[in-house]
Amino acid sequence: MPNTQGAPSFSGASTFSVSESRPIGTTVGTISAVDGTNPINYTITIGGTHFTIDSTSGIVYTARVFDSENGDIRINITVSATSSESTDQIFEINITPENDNPPVFNPNVYFVSVVENTATSTSIALLTVTDADGTTPTISIFSGNNDNKFELRASNTKEIITQTADLDYEGTTNSYVLIIHATDTAQAVTGAIITATATVIITVEPANEHTPAFSPTSITNTINENSTIGTMIANPVATDEDASPHDIAKYTINQVTQNRCCDD
Ligand SMILES: [Ca+2]
Ligand SMILES: [Ca+2]
Ligand SMILES: [Ca+2]
Ligand SMILES: [Ca+2]
């Protein structure tokens, strides 16, 4: 029997949810009220900047794009259902967080110096990568790791460590450019998998590995008495396998022992 006197009464869900980042006009849910067989007119009386409602069907749509990282967590709206009279009810709409931010390296270029022969598992760089969604991206060395000299520490993949102890300044390679990737899971809206890139420029520095050695180790020469000052009496030659600045810088006379003989 038609009710022509009473106010509409709401039925059904009073809590809804919608994901952040969805475009304006995304369907949130349907609010329903009844007043016998009388048609109901729905309006949003509080919260109309966030959502719209179809006045006939009660379907609620988004009126803006929500952002969980910017404080959109839960929004209450007041809906008025009107037939011959009006009834108001508050509805709670939760904003569901989604993966909608890419990983970001900051900085995205790192300059690193490593002394040759640095021990295995020595930390050489700590990368800073964040993701506003709070998720942990997968980090990998994409390219440039020639001869596998470096790796990411297993317990902290933001840390680059030496994989071997045989970095060699005098060898064929004394600089490396690693391209590091931080890969997110699929983005909520686009489905795209986002990869951020960082560059790590590593310069191998020389160590003082070798001791100078004379060859030959002794020279015996005879000079004439009365030789003029500046007469060359020997030309000792030493070698050092290190490169500058750890090769031979200078020669010095360490000790002079004078043996006099034949004095009358
Ligand atoms: Ca967001
Ligand atoms: Ca998010
Ligand atoms: Ca993310
Ligand atoms: Ca040396």
Image: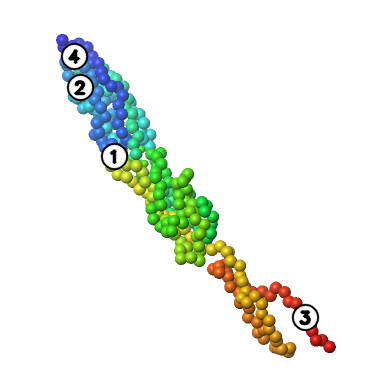
Residue 155 image offset from top left, x and y in percent:
47, 44
* Residue 220 versus residue 23 in the image, above or below: below
The answer to which image quadrant residue 148 occupies is bottom left
Nearer the camera: disc 4 or disc 2: 4
Cα gap from disc 4 to disc 2, whole angstroms? 13 Å
Residue 217 image offset from top left, x and y in percent:
65, 75
Cα gap from disc 3 to disc 4, whole angstroms? 131 Å
Residue 189 tag number: 1
Nearer the camera: disc 3 or disc 4: 3
What secondary structure is marked by label 2?
A: strand
Q: Residue flagged by tag 1: what amino acid is it?
A: Val
Q: Residue flagged by tag 3: what amino acid is it?
A: Asn
The answer to which image quadrant residue 60 occupies is top left
Identity of the residue drawn at 26% across and 25% down: 44
Nearer the camera: disc 3 or disc 2: 3
**Residue that mark 3 sits on:** 259
**Residue that mark 2 sits on:** 41
Q: Residues within 10 Å of mark 1 (few under 14, many from 20)?
A: some
**Residue that mark 4 sits on:** 36
Q: Residues within 10 Å of mark 4 (few under 14, many from 20)?
A: some
Q: Is residue 124 left or right of residue 77?
A: right
Work out whether residue 104 can be spotted. no
Nearer the camera: disc 1 or disc 4: 1
Cα gap from disc 3 to disc 1, whole angstroms? 93 Å
